[in-house]
Amino acid sequence: MALVALVGFASIGIQYADAAQAHRPKKDTIQASLDALVKAGVAPGALASVRDSKGRVTNYTAGVNDPRTKAKVPTDGYVRVASSTKMYTAVAVLQLVDEGKVKLDEPIETYLPGLVRGEGFDGRTITVRHLLGMTSGLPEYDLPDVSEWGNRYYDPRDMLDSAFSHPAHAPAPGGQVQYRNTNYIVAGLLVQRVTGRPLGEVITNKILKPARLHETYWPGVGEKTIRQPYAKGYLPDPETTKWVDTTQVDPSIAWAAGQLVSTPSDVNKFLVALQNGKLITPATLAEMRDSKVFLPGGEALPDLVWHYGLGTTGFDLSCGGRAWGHGGDIDGYSSRTAITADGRAVTIVVTAESSPVPDGVFQVLDAFDAALCAGR
């Protein structure tokens, strides 16, 4: 599996030089954008959900769910949302902050004594804020090919044993944003230690149920299938370039960093609930959106610009303003999701990991930006 696949380059922000007017499409342009993604070979299929500021929902599909049978992509079908899971894990931690059970600037050592130790890093100098904001300097765990991880169950300790065998990425916590799934494995363990309950149960009972997210769920131990109707996920065969179905996998290697399954419209409902103060207090949401600039593509993709907060990403739109959300990439799916200040929420999913396709990431982001800017 490519590094980007599970790292989930989440809600990549992009700065555009084009005039804002050029990115103000009518609603039918959203459909055209999805059709263009499929035509360009980014993925066999695509689906999206757009929720306007008044709560009206429009769902879109493009391409096919099965290249062999030409079956249609299910409208608002279930997908693996990968690193968008980090928003939910972060909210679980921030709810504990609101309850006075966790402090953002307290060392992780306070809650998980002796756990975070390794070459160049120590849990006594890494705070909860550092974990959620990706500024801990913790190293990443190894990501094998999907043919290996997709058929194996991983315990959170497996990921930490892998990560902690490597040296730190930064000389000191609190500096540069370095997007690493390891941070959220530790954050998930923090939630479990403080609550005394499994992370999936906490997210279900304290986030999904209160926000009435009936189409979002935490897969059970060993659960490789996805509920019906689902959009199938694919990877291109490196030799034949034909699409290979990678839908049925064990997502435990992602755990708190990327395990959730949802539908595009339900992810939008989560964003609305979060922004409207139904899950954490306004003050804590402000902390969540207090961000640092991050260039996730490095030298390879210098035009990509993020503003990473605490489990959420802010990015500047071509039509003005900043939207907040996340996104994720896993072998089989690439998704982007965000909400604007006036409550317009968009989730776009393509049914293959977009990075291997030339300009695939940018094409998805252009469609995403267009959908967020439509009607403004």
Image (spheres, rainbow, N blue to C red):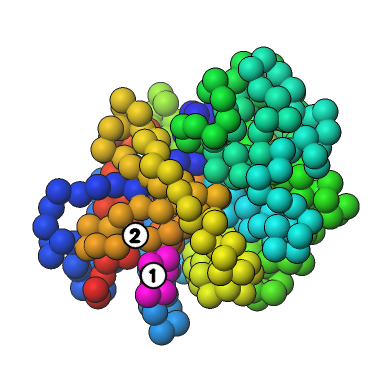
| 2 and 1 marks in contact (CB < 8 Å) | yes
Q: Is residue 279 left or right of residue 54?
A: right
The region drawn magenta spans 339-346
Residue located at (48% from left, 35% from top)? 177
Image coords of residue 192 (percent x, y):
81, 49
Q: Do we see residue 252 in this rendering?
A: no
Q: Nearer the viewer, residue 51 or 355?
A: 51
Image coords of residue 275 (percent x, y):
51, 70
Q: Is residue 342 magenta?
A: yes
Q: Nearer the viewer, residue 125 or 160?
A: 125
Question: How busy is the neighbourhood of tag 1: few (under 14 within 10 Å), some, or many (20 plus)?
Answer: few
Q: Which mark is residue 143?
A: none
Image coords of residue 165 (percent x, y):
69, 16
Question: How busy is the neighbourhood of tag 2: few (under 14 within 10 Å), some, or many (20 plus)?
Answer: some
Quadrant (top left, top right, bottom left, bottom right) of the C terminus: bottom left
> Dot 2: what SS?
strand
Residue located at (71% from left, 72% from top)? 209
Residue located at (41% from left, 74% from top)? 343
On the image, numbered disc 1 is attached to which residue?
341
> Dot 1: what SS?
loop
Q: Is residue 364 left or right of residue 276?
A: left
Q: Which mark is residue 322?
A: 2
The amino acid at mark 2 is Arg
Q: Do we see residue 365 in this rendering?
A: yes
